[in-house]
Amino acid sequence: MSRLFVVLVLVVAAAGLLRWRRPAWYWLTFGIALATLRVLVRYASVMEACGLTVPPPRWRLALARMANRPAPASRAPRILRLRPTRTGLVLRLGLRPGQDAFDVAASCDRLRHSFAMYGVTSREIRSGVVELRMTGYDVLAQVQMPVKVDRTPMRVPVALREDGAVHYRDYRTCPHALTVGATKSGKSVYQRNLVAELATQDVALVGIDCKQGVELFPLARRFSALADNPDTAADLLDALVTHMEGVYQLIRANQRITADIPDAEIAADIWDLPETLRPTPIVLLVDEVAELALFATKEEEKRRDRIITALARLAQLGRAAGIYLEICGQRFGSELGKGITMLRAQLTARTAHRVNDETSANMAFGDIAPDAVLAAISIPTDTPGLAVTGDSTGGWARIRTPHTSMRQAVNACNRHAHRTAELPGLAAFRPELPPTVSLVKIPAPTEAPASA
Ligand SMILES: Nc1ncnc2c1ncn2[C@@H]1O[C@H](COP(=O)(O)OP(=O)(O)OP(=O)(O)O)[C@@H](O)[C@H]1O
Ligand SMILES: [Mg+2]
């Protein structure tokens, strides 16, 4: 008996320790079983307490009255499926007549407390079916991407969502993206993560990093073209526009619209071209975009207009030519001058890291998902990398990228350096490869002349 008691105490202590230090392991060992049991046992009473039940149908009330039996209880949504996952539970519910997916969405916070879960989100699968995704612990505190993630061409996993699902950056669905955030909020790590993932695909990477190249030049082996100052960036963008025009000529030359060509085979973008003819898709990554739009002299103003015009043209016309934009900056609003809001309107996928004021959050979400603005402002300073992402459907979610170090990104880029495409028009911007071992000698401070 006493031995059993000792074992029990040890198991409870181990569970407590795991829950405190390793919540992910706790979930896999104890959490799943306990939470499943809790949800199944408390289900009916929780649904009733949360106002998610409907009165029984009239025929059942009439039958009960005729049989002189007590009136049947109100009915909760039917459980269609309960699936445990690596991070939580997925509960699929069939709504009763008269119930609404909005009722369930409005009760998510109450359900979270009642089932003692860390987070609950709901989404409508189809009419009458709602899915509740519950997380057992804070999955964004220490991001661990699942081992098995979908990797299809031009669709890469970049972050984990707060409901435990993987967040993908899908260039074929949302060609262009904007990422904003205050300084040290995690934009460059997000972009680095994206580069490390894109490096494994057959895509040409082109970068503009006006922080003198500190973020992108270490990854140069996988980049087909790089610019580290606004002057080179202006030339690079002009070359990209010329490349885009060349791709359109190629598509036109291969359209051959004749009566016997099936509709599906008429090329309208690079993906309709046969693989042998298809130009390599290009992802243009711009870090610190505001640097490209600031100017102090007349000359710089001309350069700025050139840059913004080229970016706007790429954003408007680039998609079918396989040119995708990924723009990062601290702010990206109309105060950066004319053309900025026109360019921003083309950047469909929006991500906001921590921002310090509502106007910055509005630059990302003001025009697509106003309630995401509040979520972006309330990101705490001690969680860099935490972000709010939305798209033009009006939906948004909290995400966090895994902390990819510069060394991991460099290793990924070097491993896939053989995929680096030679783009004929951009050969002049091919970066000089960094030496494998760089020994930078920092000059000793010059001695101040001794005062007489
Ligand atoms: N996903 C993450 N998980 C954990 N730590 C992170 C994450 N992302 C960023 N950080 C931490 O935050 C620091 C700043 O990140 P980063 O350089 O990406 O910020 P930034 O927004 O690009 O800042 P700046 O605008 O000044 O360039 C990183 O050095 C890293 O330590
Ligand atoms: Mg940065």
Image (spheres, rainbow, N blue to C red):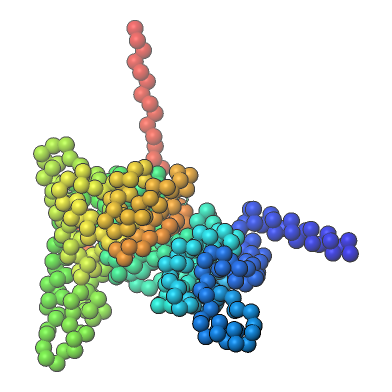
Q: Is residue 366 visible?
A: yes
153 left or right of 145?
Answer: left
> Do we see residue 166 in this rendering?
no
Give residue 411's position: percent from left, percent from top: 43, 58
Residue appearing at x 39%, y 28% in the figure: 444
**Between residues 288 and 180, which one lies in front from this camera angle?**
180
**Residue at the spot x=27%, y=65% of the render?**
175
Q: Position of residue 252 (x, y in %)?
A: 12, 76
Residue 350: x and y in percent read: 32, 58
Pick the residue in front: 442 or 282.
282
Q: Which quadrant, please, contains the N terminus? A: bottom right
Q: What's the residue at 53%, 78% (across, down)?
A: 56
Q: Quadrant of residue 154?
A: bottom left
Residue 169 as seen in the image, left or right of residue 6: left
Vertical relation: 205 (above or below) 268: above
Outermost residue toward the right in this view: 1
Q: Is residue 1 left or right of residue 127?
A: right
Percent x, y of residue 301 = 13, 42
